[in-house]
Image (cartoon, coloured by chain):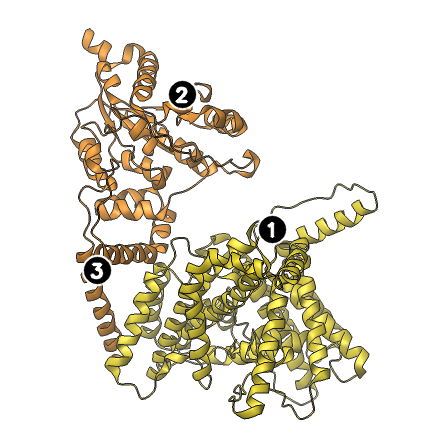
Chain colours: A orange, B yellow
Amino acid sequence: MRRFVTHALIFALIQALILVVIWRTCPDDPNHYMAATIDKHARLRAAATPRVIFVGGSSVGFSVDSRAFEPLGLEPVNMGLNDGLGLPFMLAEVAGQLRAGDVVIVAPETHLYWTGSQDDALWAVMQQRPANVACLAAAGPRELANLSDQGLHFLARKLRCAAHQITTNRELPTIYQRDSFDAHGDFAAHRELAPKREQPIDQPWPDPKALSFDRSISALAQFARRCERAGARCFMAWCPTRRHQLQREAAVFAAIEARLDAEVNMPMLERPSEIGFAEPDFFDRGPHLSGDAAAARSARLASALSMALGDDSPQSRTAY
Amino acid sequence: MTFTTLTFLLFLAVVFAGYWSVRGRVGQNWVLLVASYVFYGWWDFRFCALILASSLVDFAIARALVRRRDGPRAAQKALVALSCTLNLGVLALFKYYGFFVDSFAAGLASLGLAPSLPTLHLVLPVGISFYTFQTLSYTIDVYRDQADARSGDASPGLASGSLLDYLTYVALFPQLVAGPIERARRLLPQLQRARSFDEDQARDGAKLMLWGFAKKIILADHLGEFVEQVYGGGIVHASGPVLAVATICFAFQIYCDFSAYSDIAIGCAKLLGLSLVRNFAYPYFSQSVDEFWRRWHISLSTWFRDYVYVPLGGSHHGPARLWLALMLTFTLSGLWHGASWTFVIWGAVNGVLVGLAARLRPASSPRLGPSDLPPPLRGFSGLRALARMLATFTVICLTWVLFRAEDLPQAMGIFSRMLTDIPRPAAWTELVHHREFLAAFGPLVVMLVTVEWLTRDREHPLGLPGWPRPLRWALYTGLCWLTIYLMPDDPGAFIYFQF
């Protein structure tokens, strides 16, 4: 037994050394898009109360212009990064950091109401900021299990990346990186650029009867209660959607909207009927609004938020 | 929990440490039982309740059989019938209800009726077909033991185990979800005594697991991507030669996938001091279809032989009864694989082929079984044997079309397209579109066949007796990292999970 275990440990040590070599060959890119999680969490902790915190995937990062919310007297913190992180993780990122007086606007990508996280996105944010494991644990044991299940695939990608680094050192020009986010956490590098003319990602969704929204609705309801206990106010918004898709998937939107109205204590700042945008309003193939469209949409959201907050808004309080 | 995940490797390390750190049968079986339920509950914890209920029912029936050993025979038969009804009823409910309702509705619709039949949306619990067969065979074996004991032929050993031993036998995690289907007579005695660590067995187990991982990830998953491109969507869009190549790829995909699962399961059990039954014995080196079925999924084939074919009369009651037994056995085996007419027909076709192969085999040709080595290919007889192997492989590939096709129209379309296209030179040009895949994985398949042929006298090729340790470790390390390197982003689940 001892001999077997010793040999197994030596063999494992050899593999660990190889792993170290691979890691050093393919070091973490400090300007990787997912490395923005470090800045977002730093801002979430550092921003003075009261804050307006935006929760969602990359659609929130790209399609919210936080400057529109500054006149409300709230410190914007845009946590939007990647929809692959899944709704439970996104909510858990913020849930532990809530303070009295905060305002939270949750605007998940619509498919997140029935889909979960993607392991490559989760592994990427863990790699960039290992402390994110606490958010993952808070999101539930299933999230941790999924992450662990996909560990070998992450290693496989790392290995392929190392092989790629050895064979070529060509850098691809891209704006999708960490320093493209501004101080609020908004993705800002695309604001002055002309929209790309790309074929949008447009796959028809399943029939709403075949979809289960239970997990996400339950997570949102729980988050709403958490906000209430912390003395924060939370609101729902929607992911910008191409008009033809909004029309085609009206039944799915209606089903989600009905569940949210009935089961989640979060007032809606906008309704699905308001989130349809024309194709030229989008920057790329994802649900990412161009600079002008993001500014217009954010102004509308800020106005709705101002009305929802009413006399309780920090702005009105400072006016007094 | 799937074998090809980091979670499983961590889980196995913890189980290994816990298992060997406790002493005695009871402690070891408790570790195995808890580990097995965690392993199974990883998919969905509700599945654990089903397997526990299924196990308890059969344990209770077995105990009742022992208590009533000297009672009327009819009461014993009633208990076995109850076990069969409950086990097969659960299987029918979860796996076949939709199939039978849809088929019945389609039958009525063809008569102009439009019935409104009740539908159920049930999740098929992973591995239900495997452990149901295991619990069912336990009750039948206990019944047979009691019958033998009554006539003084054997001691009633099987039913004497404790509930802990029995639950561990049913749920044993290495073989729980996709076999090998273990018989109580073989596995239960191993669980009824304390296991001691055997270094050679553990080493061999680790190597067998590595071989399994390599086959699954390097070959099965990548071949599967190509096969899905060609077969996916339920329509016939590729040319005949591409369909033929995809079918050959599927033959190797399903072999690498399923034999890999068995290798990992057997290797894992070896690490825990347990021996599981061999499930594959180089089936593609078979020289006839009946030999193929003695080398392929051995634990299922022997299960059907012992609990369906032999009770139906087997070969002892004339040709008509033999054909009936053969056809029923293979058709049921097809249905076991999946609730679809393609599987039923696949089973029936194999029944016909096995029957014909057994009848047409020359008297001089030996009847090779799983423990027989595929003979060396020397001289003219070697050429003949090679020709028989290739012919058998071709026939088996054709039956795989039925197995892989999404429905019968697609299967028929594939046969028709292959028949009409293969003689047309122009149709072969479509293969050019897949040249990168074929250039990468064609040589790997050839390498697999060569390695397996050269090492067919062993259970797996990684034993490497006589190789110096540094060289062996270098090979294991290389295979390990090649496997990780080639792990696809979207890995395929083991094919037999769906059964």
Q: Which residue is mark 3?
A: A22
In depth, the one of B325 and B443 nearer the eye is B443
**Residue A27, placed above or below residue A69:** below
In the picture, measured across the screen, residue A66 lies left or right of residue B397, that is: left
Q: Amino acid at mark 2?
A: Met
Which mark lies nearer to you, 3 or 1?
1
Which image quadrant: the C terminus of chain B?
bottom right
| Residues flagged by tags 2 and 1 on a common chain | no
In depth, the one of B242 and B310 nearer the eye is B242
In depth, the one of B306 and B280 nearer the eye is B280
Q: Amino acid at mark 1?
A: Gly
Could you say whether the residue bearing mark 1 is in a helix, strand or loop? Answer: helix
Which image quadrant: the N terminus of chain B?
bottom left
| Residues flagged by tags 3 and 2 on a common chain | yes
In depth, the one of B376 and A62 nearer the eye is B376
Residue A50: quarter of image: top left
Q: Position of residue B477 (x, y in %)?
A: 28, 71
Q: Position of residue B49 (x, y in %)?
A: 52, 56
Q: Which residue is mark 1?
A: B234
Q: Position of residue A15 (x, y in %)?
A: 24, 67
Q: Which residue is mark 2?
A: A268
Give me the chain letter of mark 3.
Answer: A
Which mark lies nearer to you, 2 or 1?
1
Residue ID at (46%, 54%): B43
In the picture, measured across the screen, residue A306 lies left or right of residue B39, that is: left
Instruction: Give the alpha-carbon distance from disc 3 to disc 1, as whole Å.
Output: 42 Å
